[in-house]
Image (cartoon, helix red, strand yellow):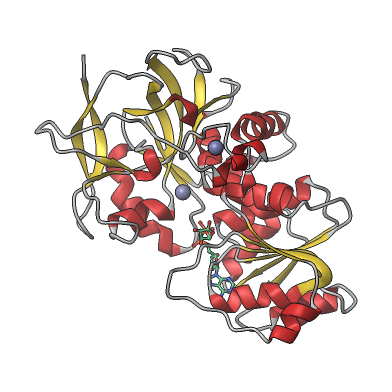
Amino acid sequence: MPQQVQGVVAPGRNEPVRVETIVIPDPGPGEAVVKIQACGVCHTDLHYKQGGINDEFPFLLGHEAAGVVESVGDGVTDVAPGDFVILNWRAVCGQCRACLRGRPWYCFATHNARQKMTLPDGTELSPALGIGAFAEKTLVAAGQCTKVDPAVAPEVAGLLGCGVMAGIGAAINTGNVGRGDTVAVIGCGGVGDAAVVGSRLAGAARIIAVDIDDRKLAKATEMGATHTVNSRTTDPVEAIRELTGGFGADVVIEAVGRPETYEQAFYARDLAGTVVLVGVPTPDMKLELPLLDVFGRGGALKASWYGDCLPSRDFPMLIDLHQQGRIDLGAFVTETIGLGDVEKAFARMHEGDVLRSVVVL
Ligand code: APR
Ligand code: ZN
Ligand code: ZN
């Protein structure tokens, strides 16, 4: 029987979100219904609400979530009712060239649930990032669920569903930060701070945090940065070179998504170093570089998609490290809120003191 639950819906471009009754179908083949326990508020949810991702309103928002599998459809063997899971954006095929090369974020045949969740009048909802987890329950493809240790707090586990995994993965997977490395992180919001945590975990000797906001730099220091540069007042490329005997950082992680910070990242790395691009630019942005510099500066320029993570490998590992006290994922949770507070959480995002507001159910 389809069930009616409460969920946060964005009805139209820039209209305030509201808690509405939504209808969840029984899981079909390959699908699962998950009872949501926690879901973080991410900038991407705000972008959906503003119409910046696509126009497929109404959206069911929320995509950084953990919960318990309630029921599964035919053919589902990897998860079962009662499992505690973290949700990810899409199930991958496991068989295409990208999947076989261990790069599932480039999978040619990703999918979400095939059935639609709806409003009671039958209007189909578009779930944010194929999840839609600001809701008591949601319908996903079973392959979007990764089982982890249920002893961890749901508001901590859900963080790995998006920004925190993207940042940690940018350091440990894409950047392949190694012991003794110098890492510079440009942009210290939630993603950049997670890159700081990942760099420390990987054994970086120096972690240089760069931001235009001193409060963000103070927070990055709490997270493990060893040096800070306010790039509003100091040229970050010069400062990073000075801190590295003129060479530049072994790994530079860009976590803003703007032309000027892409350019800073390009010039702040050691000639043999790696630039990791995790900040997402908008379609109109361009970067102009002298070709001689592109040619003359070797090293690598790498984009990081969802931290190049393998959920079944990385989610349980990071939860384990958190449970052991070796990383503190709880430090990313600024406040826990209810389903009715998402609009307020969007407003707070720009106040500068919030890493993550997390809806707890
Ligand atoms: N130079 C340095 N830092 C900057 C600059 C700049 N020119 N402009 C903004 N910042 C800082 C902000 O002060 C803030 O601390 O970048 C940080 C961005 O943080 P958030 O807005 O909290 O964004 P976050 O969630 O961390 O995501 C960052 O990564 O995955 C992507 O889509 C995501 O593009 C976004 C980026
Ligand atoms: Zn997100
Ligand atoms: Zn695939």
Question: Residue 52 versus residue 190: which sits nearer the camera?
Answer: 52
Residue 6, placed above or below residue 59: above
Quarter of the figure that contains the C terminus: top left
Residue 92, placed above or below residue 68: below
Q: Position of residue 62 (x, y in %)?
A: 37, 42
Q: Position of residue 240 (x, y in %)?
A: 78, 75
Q: In the figure, residue 131 lies in which quadrant?
A: top left
Q: Is residue 139 left or right of residue 322?
A: left
Question: Residue 356 versus residue 90: which sits nearer the camera?
Answer: 90
Instruction: Note whether residue 230 is visible.
Output: no
Instruction: Note whether residue 108 is visible.
Output: yes
Q: Position of residue 268 (x, y in %)?
A: 75, 75
Write the residue at 20% across / 31% down: 22
Q: Position of residue 352 (x, y in %)?
A: 48, 63
Q: Is residue 183 left or right of residue 286?
A: right
Write the residue at 51% across / 35% down: 92
Question: Residue 97 versus residue 38: which sits nearer the camera?
Answer: 97
Q: Is residue 327 left or right of residue 68?
A: right
Q: Is residue 26 left or right of residue 11?
A: right
Q: In the figure, residue 237 lies in which quadrant?
A: bottom right
Write the residue at 34% across / 28% down: 139
Quarter of the figure that contains the N terminus: top left
Q: How many marks?
A: 0
